[in-house]
Amino acid sequence: MPLSERTITEAIIKSYTDKLLDAISCDVAIVGAGPAGLVAAADLARGGWKTCLFERKLSIGGGMWGGGMMMNEIVVQDEGKEILDEFGINTKPFKKGYYTADSIETVCSLGARACKNGAKIFNLVSVEDIILKENKAVGVVINWTAVEMAGLHVDPLTVDSRFIIDSTGHPAEVVRVIERKVDARLLTPSGKVEGERSLWADRAEQTTIENTKEIFPNVYVAGMCANASFGSYRMGPIFGGMLLSGRKAAKIIADRLRKEKEEQQQQQT
């Protein structure tokens, strides 16, 4: 049977439109598909929560793709290895407590698991703002990355979400928008973004997990964004803290969603 160009085009437009329409209301909107965002998406979707992940770039994976200085290997410690093992990602012991993994295999495996668990990933889509009601975040404002890059005056669309995870890495993009546009303090010591400090791998790996928490009503930070927001260190090409941070953010939000659901059921009875 000869192929029809029109049918190919129709298939893409309809399939994508159906996916986007289904995503305009979700339980959790994750911004940034780096390692923390991918783990959070996989865990939340596995728990049955409607999860949408928005990545402004063409590729997912954040800084993990490039390993260290374009050598596509990453390092994880014992706790990070446990997550990679769970996702079926091969690791090799280097020294006691240190393991290496192929960064390409890792990103592909994390993304595939998130999709198979039911998360919807939208690349080339930027989150430019939040939806704010009664001083709480209740959704995100999205536009094509190409529109943003070209500086075109094109109005965006919106996605309702009960919770938001900012996992945009060093720039802390969602948190920066809130800092700039919302007349309210962030849940940081100064009420503003504290800013990222220089590299200290050991301390950064610890504080990435410690700083994974709510920074504004219904908005959580994960991964390097957590350290940038709360004023801690960068860690370089070791990624255990990133993976564990995504898992922690997912657990906190899943617990809140579960509690809200139980309360609603009790009210109905």
Image: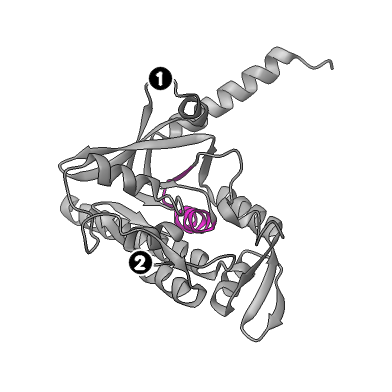
Q: Residue at left 58%, top 46%?
A: 60
Q: Is residue 46 magenta?
A: yes
Q: Earlier in the sequence, mark 2 or mark 1?
A: 1
Q: Is residue 178 toward the left or the right of residue 94 in the image?
A: left
Q: Is residue 88 toward the left or the right of residue 143 in the image?
A: right
Q: Does the magenta stretch include residue 133?
A: no
Q: Nearer the viewer, residue 212 or 84?
A: 212
| Secondary structure beneath label 2 | loop
Give the main secondary structure of the magenta stretch: helix
Location of residue 26 by image quarter:
top left
**Circle 2/circle 1 CB separation < 8 Å:** no
Q: Which of 209 and 173 is in front in this view?
A: 173
The reply to whether residue 178 is visible in this rendering is yes
Q: Give the range drawn in magenta.
A: 35-54
Which residue carries the number 2 mark? 211
Position of 133 relative to 168 (above/below): above
Give x and y (percent) for residue 120. 51, 42
Give x and y (percent) for residue 15. 58, 27
How would you rate the neighbour count of disc 1 (Cα within 10 Å): few for under 14, some for 14-19, many for 20 or more?
A: few
Q: Residue at left 69%, top 67%?
A: 101
Give x and y (percent) for residue 40. 47, 57
Position of 5 relative to 231 (above/below): above
| Secondary structure beneath label 1 | loop
- What amino acid type is highlighted by mark number 1? Val
Q: Is residue 22 toward the left or the right of residue 133 in the image?
A: right
Give x and y (percent) for residue 102. 71, 63
Which residue carries the number 1 mark? 154
Q: Which colour scheme is used?
A: one colour
